[in-house]
Image (cartoon, grey):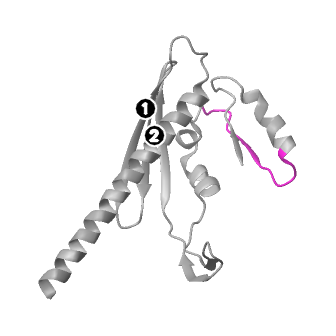
Amino acid sequence: MRIWTPRGQGGEWNNPRYHDLAGPTSELWEIPEGDHVGGYAARPEEYEARVVGDVRPLSRTASGVDGRSMGTKQLHPWKLVFEVEEDGDHCEMVVHLDAGDRSLSGRGRSRRNPSDPAIPQIGEELAAARALQDLAAHLTNDAWEAIEGFEQTKETAD
């Protein structure tokens, strides 16, 4: 699905063309009242329904790297929401993870070098990647803390 907000920061006129090139399975959702990356702010309920959708846990059997069965995997109904604030030279991104029983956030920033062309998508992608890296670090730290807590509990039980 391509989300088209015609009042963006340039290049939005390409969205109908990209939609046509993608073929019959492509969907183009135009939000004329939305600004650049403002689809969620303009239509939050519809955005939730169309983009996030009704996410339910699904089970499937997966194969490992060597082809052996890994058993049944459970897909978690986690939700990511990206929040962006930008001007012509800076982009700040916060990615919020709703993991059902807890919430975490990661932050990322980018700054355009004055000698570089103004292409907001590049700054957004860098800021998003950095926010996701920060979120991954928080998830990793939480996992290590849980492992340490388990090991301490196990030691005291022995």
- Going by the numbered disc 2, the residue's amino acid type is Arg
- Where's residue 98, x and y in %? 42, 58
**8 magenta-colored:** no
Front-most of 104 and 139?
A: 139
Q: Position of residue 40 (x, y in %)?
A: 55, 43
Of the image marks 1 and 2, the number of the one nearer the N terminus = 1
Q: Is residue 30 magenta?
A: yes
Local secondary structure at mark 1: strand
Q: Which residue is mark 1?
A: 109
Question: Relative to 153, does residue 42 appear above or below in the rendering?
Answer: above
Disc 2 element: helix
Q: Residue at x 48, y 26 (%)?
A: 86
Measuring from the top left, give residue 65's x and y in whole percent.
61, 72
**Residue, x 51% and y 67% (percent of image)?**
77
In the rendered view of the protein, which quadrant contains the C terminus? Answer: bottom left
Compared across the picture, whether 146 is left or right of 15 comes to left
Mark linked to residue 130:
2
Residue furthest to the top in view is: 115
Q: Residue furthest bottom?
A: 158
Q: Main secondary structure of the magenta part?
A: loop
Q: Estimate how packed mark 2 is, as few (under 14), some (14 to 19) or many (20 or more) residues with alpha carbons within 10 Å.
A: many
Q: Which residues are magenta?
A: 22-34
Q: Report, in whole angstroms, how far the alpha carbon at label 1 lies from the one at label 2.
A: 7 Å
Residue 24 visible in image: yes
Q: Amino acid at mark 1?
A: Arg
Q: Disc 1 vs disc 2: Cβ atoms closer than 8 Å?
A: yes
